[in-house]
């Protein structure tokens, strides 16, 4: 179950498998600092969180200093790659966004979050997309390619899911997500 109801907040639960995990958030906490959001984890020396947004910021866990590096805050619209030496769980209390944010995409690969607490069929979520044919979107395990003439995505990626991070590759720089 990706979330638990609280009287004033939602608790998002992200299960991490040993190794690399592509993740995103759908809850927004008043304190989006890395040390606050990852406080529920039991990390070990060498666990890492990175983003390819903003010049590839990263932080690494150190037993003496907690999370150290230039990735200091998380953003609900970005996707992240987290490496853990053993399975772990992130629990984040916060609020669900009231409306989605439209993001500009850069030419090439963009790392994105999926800020919704429910699965949504990719062709529904991206129904207004005006991407060139051949645009690709991928999760850690699945992918889809856009056909501009049919205005449809096809491939193994059928649904966008909470807690997962995504990458989209696009040509041109005048495009938005979603």
Image: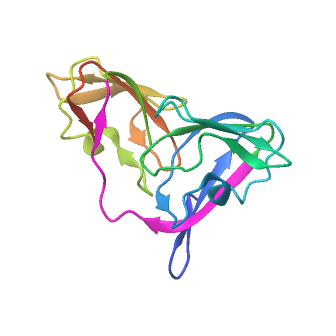
Residue 85 figure quarter: top right
Colouring style: rainbow
Vertical placement of 55 versus 3: above or below?
above
Residue 35 figure quarter: bottom right
Residue 11 lies, in percent from the top left, at 57, 66
| Residue under the point 18% across and 23% down | 148
| Residue under the point 62% across and 52% down | 34
- Reply yes or no: does residue 81 show up in magenta: no
Figure quadrant of the C terminus: top left
Position of residue 51 in the picture relative to residue 160 (left or right) = right
Vertical placement of 15 versus 128: above or below?
below
Q: Which residue occupies the foreground of this view, 26 or 66? A: 66
Figure quadrant of the N terminus: bottom right
Q: Main secondary structure of the magenta part?
A: strand
Position of residue 62 in the picture relative to residue 138 (left or right) = right
Position of residue 168 in the picture relative to residue 150 (left or right) = right
Residue that protrudes farthest toward the left in the picture:
149
Q: Which residue occupies the foreground of this view, 101 or 157? A: 101
Residue 10 lies, in percent from the top left, at 52, 70
Q: How many labels were placed on the picture?
A: 0
Residue 117 lies, in percent from the top left, at 45, 58
Q: Which residues, given as a range, are shown in magenta?
A: 88-106
Q: Which residue occupies the foreground of this view, 33 or 143? A: 33
Residue 18 figure quarter: top right
Residue 169 lies, in percent from the top left, at 36, 22
Position of residue 15 in the picture relative to residue 8 (left or right) = right
- Reply yes or no: does residue 93 show up in magenta: yes
| Residue under the point 31% across and 54% down | 100
């Amino acid at each position: 179950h990706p979330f638990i109801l609280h009287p004033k907040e939602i608790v998002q639960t992200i299960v991490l498998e040993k190794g690399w995990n592509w993740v995103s958030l759908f809850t927004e906490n008043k304190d989006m600092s890395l040390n606050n959001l990852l406080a529920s984890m039991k990390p070990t020396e060498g666990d890492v969180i990175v983003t390819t947004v903003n010049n590839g910021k990263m932080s690494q866990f150190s037993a003496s200093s907690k999370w150290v590096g230039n990735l200091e805050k998380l953003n609900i619209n970005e996707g992240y790659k987290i490496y853990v030496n053993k399975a772990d769980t992130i629990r984040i209390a916060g609020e669900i966004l009231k409306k989605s944010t439209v993001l500009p995409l850069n030419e090439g690969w963009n790392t994105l979050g999926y800020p919704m607490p429910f699965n949504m069929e990719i062709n529904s979520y991206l129904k207004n997309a005006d991407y060139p044919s051949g645009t690709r979107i991928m999760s850690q395990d699945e992918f889809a390619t856009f056909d501009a003439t049919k205005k449809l995505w096809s491939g193994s990626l059928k649904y966008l899911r909470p807690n997962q991070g995504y990458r989209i590759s696009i040509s041109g720089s005048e495009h938005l997500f979603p």
